[in-house]
Image (cartoon, grey):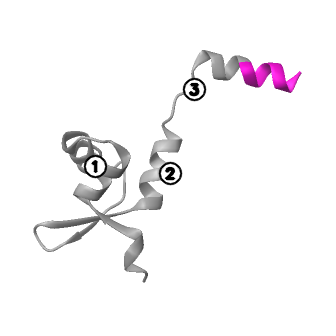
Amino acid sequence: MNASIYMRRREVITQYGLTNRILSSWQSRRLIPFVKVGRRLTLFKAADIEDFLIRYTVQSKSDLAGRKAVAK
């Protein structure tokens, strides 16, 4: 197991510009996978966070219009 791919809560918040509250909400709703080590340490895989953010990204209308123009 490569330990460098795991991030602590503070690292996830800082790197992705999230708040502690939103990360806790995602965790309690089981929207993102995590590893609980003991009582206090929670680890997240960077790839899991990135996949989640990509999956729930909403495209703007201008992005969608650009795709239609390219498809024609």
* Mark 2 lies on residue: 51
* Viewer-side label of 2, 1: 1
* Mark 1 lies on residue: 13
The alpha-carbon separation of the residues under discs 2 and 1 comes to 16 Å
Q: In the rendered image, which quarter is residue 11 located in?
A: bottom left
Instruction: Tell me which numbered mark, 2 or 1, is placed earlier along the sequence.
Output: 1
* Residue at the front extreme, as displayed: 14
Please report the bounds of the magenta region as a residue range: 66-72
Check whether the beta carbons of the residues at disc 2 and disc 1 lie within 8 A of each other: no
Which label is found at residue 59? 3
* Viewer-side label of 3, 1: 1
Residue 20 lies in the magenta stretch:
no
| Residue 35 in picture, x, y percent from top left | 29, 68
Query: Going by the image, does 29 lie left or right of 72?
Result: left
- Tag 3: amino acid: Gln
The alpha-carbon separation of the residues under discs 3 and 1 comes to 23 Å
Q: Residues within 10 Å of mark 3 (few under 14, many from 20)?
A: few
Instruction: Tell me which numbered mark, 3 or 1, is placed earlier along the sequence.
Output: 1
Query: Going by the image, does 49 lie left or right of 9?
Result: right
Find numbered disc 1 in the image and state the secondary structure of the residue it sits on.
Answer: helix
Image quadrant holding the N terminus, namely: bottom left
Out of 71 and 27, give the one closest to the viewer: 71
* Residue at the right extreme, as displayed: 72
Find numbered disc 3 in the image and state the secondary structure of the residue it sits on.
Answer: loop
Identity of the residue drawn at 50% across and 51% down = 51
